[in-house]
Structure formats: structure tokens, C-alpha cells
Image (cartoon, helix red, strand yellow):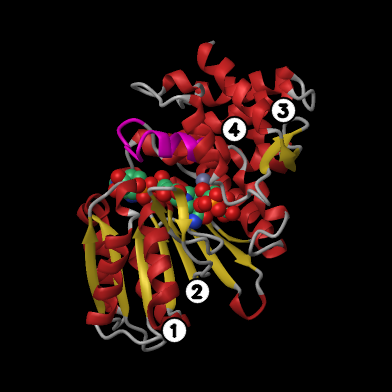
């Protein structure tokens, strides 16, 4: 990690596909110069959503134009339901209609929804073109803009269709978080805390003490984002395509994704980071039930996430959830399933997560039934 006053740069080491994540204030105004310095002559399709466009699109387009970068903007509807096939076709048609070449780029200006969808388009148009991430939600700055997982949802489940396609550059302008709704900031915080729970117990302890400063902005926020990006960069460099250790980044996601699918990706009821928050508490509780970890750790995780204002139990989700066998059907579609056996990220304690193969489905079923009843 290199530091320059409030600017931090984290490098994702992937040989000839390595790239920088630049983090700090004022980066949208500088985006044109940052991109032109790395890719002279490049043109961009700028994909964003209506909320982000209202607050930040003009500034980005101005910055690109000032550096002589031609840009073709496309504004989509906000929300998880935009991660679907017809919107993928929409983005691909837009990129082709603008006559962008393989060496040009799709630039994602937005949260994880826009990043995942645009990255998928960049990965398949002309069999793979340039991709630049300008993440605008906390979740996207600390997680989804890094690592090259792209994709869309299916009626069969979350993120089931997609490709790995790494970005060439990530510009995380921390100023833009000032316009992010507080509910979305909290949701992104769940993925920040995740890195502590995976294998950085001292980071989790730091968050327990300093989360108010992370929420209020400034140095603590930048430190939290840079620590998260470094953790993600390390995990991706070690196992780019999730053959093994990268699966740790999925802590809380097997339960969380099932809950997102069970609520029909309705962001009024549950957004991704909230599903991850509930999922991480469930993963710690399930680990305790399997005698792998102390129930005190599960209580500590639940206490912290609840303290910042996140939902932590299934009953926090508004409205009825479908029966447990439907949740199990979603869990069985998880991409970590091997030869029909469930794989979960479980834990031996705070910061001691591990990938558990062959988790008995009947134990998971009984556990979920009990949790729903309690
Ligand atoms: N590819 C990955 O590695 C990865 C990692 C984590 C999550 N994800 C995916 O990311 C998605 C969730 O991302 P998200 O939480 O960013 O959701 P999102 O993209 O829906 O953004 C959240 C909301 O905030 C708004 N918004 C974003 N930035 C804003 C800003 N600066 N000012 C005002 N409004 C703003 C958006 O319009 C949207 O309404 C999920 O689909 C999840 O599966 C992917
Ligand atoms: O980058 C990863 O690897 C992750 O698992 C990060 C997660 O936060 C993210 O939500 C990811 O999209 C989930 O991946 P999936 O393979 O379970 O769809
Ligand atoms: Zn996630």
C-alpha cells in the first residue's frame, strides 16, 4: 500500500493483468487525467444508474472531456433487479453502437450492481475489452470493484451467470460517499467488517472502537477502505478464480444470497450488504452449534453489526420469508457446491474463518428452522 497524504494506492498483483486501486478524495475530478496517463487515446462507455448520474455523472464526463477522452454515457435504473439479462443486452448494444474497440473501455460509475453488470459486458463484448471501475458506494469501493467477479442474477439464484474479468484501474473517490444514503453506507460496512471476521481480528477490534469515525468520514474512513481493498487484493492475488482460499470472501454469503433470492431481490426489504450481515451472524452461530467456535463470538459479531444499525436476524427482514426448504433450494444453487455437497465459510472464532466442505444439509435445515422460530 502506498500513501500520499489522504491518497492510498493498493496494487492487485496478477502478473500482466495487475492494476491499481487508487483511493481518496477528489478522484472523479481527476479521473480523466488518471485514465489518459495510463491509456492514451482511449474512449469509454460510461455506465451508471439514475441516482448516481444525478449526483456525479456531469463531474465525471467533464473530467474525461478535459483530458480529451470521448465518452458515451448510459443511465440505467438503480437497484439489484438491474442485474438481469435484458440489461446486459442493453449495455452490450450501447457499447457496440458507440463503436468502441477492444482497446477502449466500459467504465462503471456506480455501486456493485452497475459494476457487476458493466464488467460482464466488458468481459464478453469483442471477447473482452477494457474495464474501468469508478465505484461510488462504500460496498463497491471496498469489495465489488476489485477482483474481477462480474455477472447477473438468474431466477435460479444470485450471480449465477457471469465471467471473471479484471478491471484495468479502480478509482475510488471517497468524497462521493457523502451523497450515499445511510442505509447503503451501513450495507457496505458489513463487507468492511467481513475482512476482520475472515482473518484480521485486529481490524475487527479496531472497527468496534472506531466505527463512528468510519461513518463520519475523513482519515478513519479512508483507512477502513484501504484496509479492505488490501485484504481483497491479497485474496484475489492468491486465488484469482476461487479454486480455494478466495472462497473465504464469501463469509456470510451462502445464507445472505439465499435471503436475497428469497426476497426476490427487492431492495426495499433487503440489500446485499444487509443479507451479508445477517449471513455472517448465522455463519458464526452455525459454527458455534457445530462446536467449532464459542457462542460468545457469534454474540460479539451480532452486537457490533446491530450497533451500527444493520439487520442481524432473519426476523429483521420485513414481510414473510418462504419456507426453509425454499431457502435450502437456493443454498443448493450456491457456486461453492461440489458434487452436490454444501460448502460454507465457517469459523473457529473472530478472524479465524475457514472453508468447510461437506456441510450436512440436514443440520443446516434444522438450524434455520430453529433460528426462524426463535
Ligand atoms: N463483484 C464482486 O466482487 C461483488 C462484491 C460484493 C457485492 N457485489 C454485488 O454488488 C451489489 C451491491 O452493490 P451496492 O451495495 O453498491 O448496491 P447498488 O449498486 O445497488 O448501490 C446501492 C444504491 O446506492 C445508490 N448509490 C450508489 N452510489 C451512490 C452515491 N455516491 N450517491 C448516491 N447514491 C448512490 C445506487 O443508485 C443504489 O440505489 C450486489 O449485486 C452484489 O451482489 C459484487
Ligand atoms: O470477490 C469475492 O470472491 C467475493 O465473494 C466477494 C463477495 O462480497 C461478493 O458478494 C461476490 O459477488 C460473491 O460472489 P459469488 O461467487 O458468491 O457470487
Ligand atoms: Zn458480497
Queried on whether the Cβ of the residue with tag 4 lies below 8 angstroms from ligand 3, the answer reads no
Q: Secondary structure at mark 3?
A: helix
CA distance separating discs 1 and 3: 47 Å
Q: Is residue 309 left or right of residue 227?
A: left
Write down the residue under mark 4: 280
Q: Point out residue 4 in the picture as x, y percentages from the top left corner.
A: 56, 61
Write down the residue under mark 2: 168
Write down the residue under mark 1: 39
Write down the residue under mark 3: 287
| Residue 141 appears in the figure | no
Asked if the residue at tag 1 contacts the one at tag 2, i.e. Cβ–Cβ closer than 8 Å, the answer is yes
| Closer-to-camera residue (73/64) | 73
Asked if the residue at tag 2 contacts the one at tag 4, i.e. Cβ–Cβ closer than 8 Å, the answer is no
- Viewer-side label of 1, 3: 3
- Viewer-side label of 4, 2: 4
- Viewer-side label of 4, 1: 4
Rendered position, 264 above or below 53: above
Density class for disc 2 (Cα within 10 Å; few <14, some 14-19, many ≥20) is many
Q: Is residue 267 magenta?
A: yes
Amino acid at each position: 500500500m502506498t500513501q500520499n497524504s489522504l491518497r492510498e494506492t493498493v496494487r492487485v498483483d496478477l502478473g500482466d493483468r495487475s492494476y491499481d486501486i487508487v483511493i481518496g478524495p477528489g478522484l472523479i475530478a481527476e479521473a480523466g487525467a488518471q485514465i489518459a496517463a495510463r491509456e492514451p487515446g482511449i474512449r469509454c462507455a460510461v455506465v451508471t444508474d439514475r441516482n448516481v448520474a444525478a449526483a456525479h455523472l456531469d463531474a465525471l464526463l467533464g473530467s474525461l472531456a478535459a483530458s480529451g477522452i470521448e465518452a458515451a454515457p448510459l443511465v440505467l435504473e438503480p437497484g439489484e433487479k438491474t442485474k438481469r439479462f435484458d440489461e446486459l443486452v442493453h449495455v452490450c448494444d450501447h457499447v457496440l453502437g458507440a463503436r468502441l474497440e477492444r482497446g477502449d473501455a466500459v467504465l462503471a460509475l456506480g455501486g456493485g450492481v452497475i459494476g457487476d453488470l458493466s464488467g460482464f459486458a466488458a468481459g464478453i463484448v469483442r471477447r473482452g475489452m477494457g474495464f474501468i471501475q469508478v465505484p461510488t458506494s462504500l460496498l463497491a469501493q471496498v469489495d465489488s470493484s476489485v477482483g474481477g467477479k462480474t455477472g447477473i442474477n438468474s431466477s435460479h439464484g444470485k450471480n449465477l451467470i457471469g465471467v471473471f474479468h479484471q478491471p484495468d484501474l479502480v478509482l475510488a473517490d471517497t468524497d462521493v460517499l457523502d451523497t450515499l444514503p445511510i442505509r447503503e453506507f451501513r450495507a457496505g460496512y458489513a463487507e468492511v467488517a467481513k475482512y476482520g471476521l475472515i482473518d484480521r481480528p485486529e481490524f475487527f477490534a479496531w472497527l468496534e472502537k472506531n466505527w463512528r469515525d468510519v461513518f463520519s468520514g475523513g482519515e478513519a474512513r479512508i483507512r477502513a477502505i484501504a484496509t479492505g481493498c488490501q485484504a481483497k487484493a491479497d485474496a484475489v492475488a492468491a486465488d484469482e478464480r476461487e479454486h480455494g482460499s478466495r472462497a473465504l470472501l464469501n463469509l456470510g454469503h451462502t445464507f445472505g444470497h439465499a435471503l436475497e433470492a428469497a426476497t426476490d431481490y427487492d431492495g426495499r426489504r433487503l440489500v446485499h450488504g444487509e443479507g451479508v450481515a445477517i449471513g455472517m451472524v448465522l455463519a458464526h452461530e452455525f459454527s458455534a452449534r457445530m462446536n467449532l467456535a464459542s457462542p460468545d463470538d457469534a454474540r460479539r459479531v451480532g452486537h457490533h453489526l446491530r450497533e451500527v444499525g444493520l439487520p442481524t436476524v432473519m426476523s429483521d427482514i420485513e414481510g414473510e420469508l418462504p419456507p426453509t426448504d425454499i431457502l435450502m433450494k437456493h443454498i443448493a444453487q450456491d457456486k461453492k457446491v461440489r458434487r452436490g455437497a454444501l460448502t460454507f465459510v465457517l469459523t473457529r472464532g473472530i478472524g479465524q474463518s475457514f472453508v468447510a466442505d461437506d456441510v450436512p444439509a440436514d443440520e443446516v435445515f434444522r438450524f434455520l428452522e430453529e433460528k426462524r422460530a426463535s
